[in-house]
Amino acid sequence: MAAGAAVWYARPVTKALPRGVLVAFEGIDGSGKSTQATLLSDWATQHGLETVRTREPTNGPWGMKVRESKVSGRLSPEEELHCFLEDRREHVATLIAPALARGAIVIIDRYYYSTAAYQGARGHDPLALIAKNREFAPKPDVVFLMDFDPKLGVDRINARGAQDTFESLPQLTKSREIFLSLNEPHIVKLDAKKPPAELHESVLFHLLHGPLKDSAKPLHLDEPPEDPKLRTR
Ligand code: TYD
């Protein structure tokens, strides 16, 4: 090599996990899902993981259709279920499955447990809904269920002045009951009244002792992230 030639070592921009990890935040509106999803995705990004933060319903055509119905009036239970399933099918095929295959951590705000809780509250069998989703949607590695008193949820929605046909008190009470009735080993129930920082600690604890356990040491996930100010270049 010619003297003085620069040698560049490509440093990976992101660290891939040995296999993708899917984390879902679930709960009724106002339970702080989005705050926790943001805290987790900031943590994962700071640790150099490829982080995909997403939500359902999506902004695709099926998702927009149900979102519009929140204001204009609800679709029939069958039509509504169809929209959520088609929205998820598209979401899995175009975003979730490819990201998991690359070894990303995928953090999703609502997933098929919302279908069980919300469409279940309209008369569908919640467990049959979960089974139907599992035919095409990957099972999350962990689900953080943010449990919250629906009365407080409705107060928050009213305080925002938003009109929302999905979030009436009887509807939310039923949805919460269904959420709480779901007992699967990968569902972690958290008390959403706790301070966000404390909930975030619990989320990290479960991940580092669960789906991220084997990657924690090799990828230095259990150490504080590198301080960007200390980088030499
Ligand atoms: P939106 O305002 O987009 O989201 P969020 O309430 O999470 O901020 O509203 C989505 C609504 O759709 C919410 O009330 C829950 C409901 N929902 C279902 O009924 N079934 C589902 O499968 C999903 C994903 C959401």
Image (cartoon, rainbow, N blue to C red):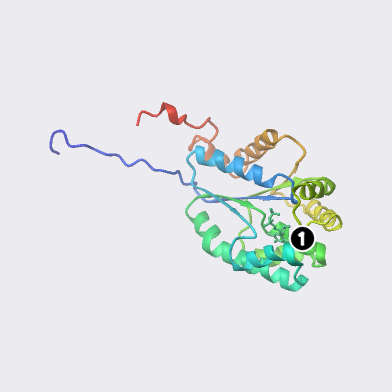
Residue at the far front in the pictured view: 161
- Can residue 136 be seen at all in this image of the molecule? no
Q: Is residue 168 left or right of residue 225?
A: right
Quadrant location, the N terminus: top left
Where in the image, quadrant-wise, is ligand 1 located? bottom right
- Is residue 231 in view? yes
Above/below status of 191 relative to 233: below
Task: Report x, y in % for residue 116.
Answer: 75, 61
Q: Is residue 221 above or below residue 230?
A: below
Which residue corresponds to the image point at 65% horizontal and 60% vertical from the top-left? 57
Q: Position of residue 22 (x, y in %)?
A: 59, 51
Q: How many labels, in total?
A: 1
Pick the front one: 44 or 228: 228
Q: Residue furthest right?
A: 170
Helix, strand or loop status at disc 1: helix
- Residue corresponding to mark 1: 118
Q: Amino acid at mark 1?
A: Tyr
Quadrant of the snapshot with the C terminus:
top left
From the viewer's side, name the closer residue of 73 and 19: 73
Q: Residue at point 71% right, 65% down?
A: 131
Q: State whether residue 80 is above or below residue 45.
A: below
Where does the image place residue 181, in percent across and percent down from the top left? 81, 53
Instruction: Using the rendered view, name the quadrant where residue 115 is placed.
Output: bottom right
Instruction: Determine whether the beta carbon of the residue marked 1 sits less than 8 angstroms from the nearest atom of ligand 1.
Output: yes
The answer to whether 222 appears left or right of 194 in the picture is left
Give the residue furthest to the left: 2
Disc 1: CA contacts within 10 A as few (<14), some (14-19) or many (>=20): many
Residue 76 shown left or right of residue 47 in the figure: right
Report x, y in % for residue 121: 81, 62
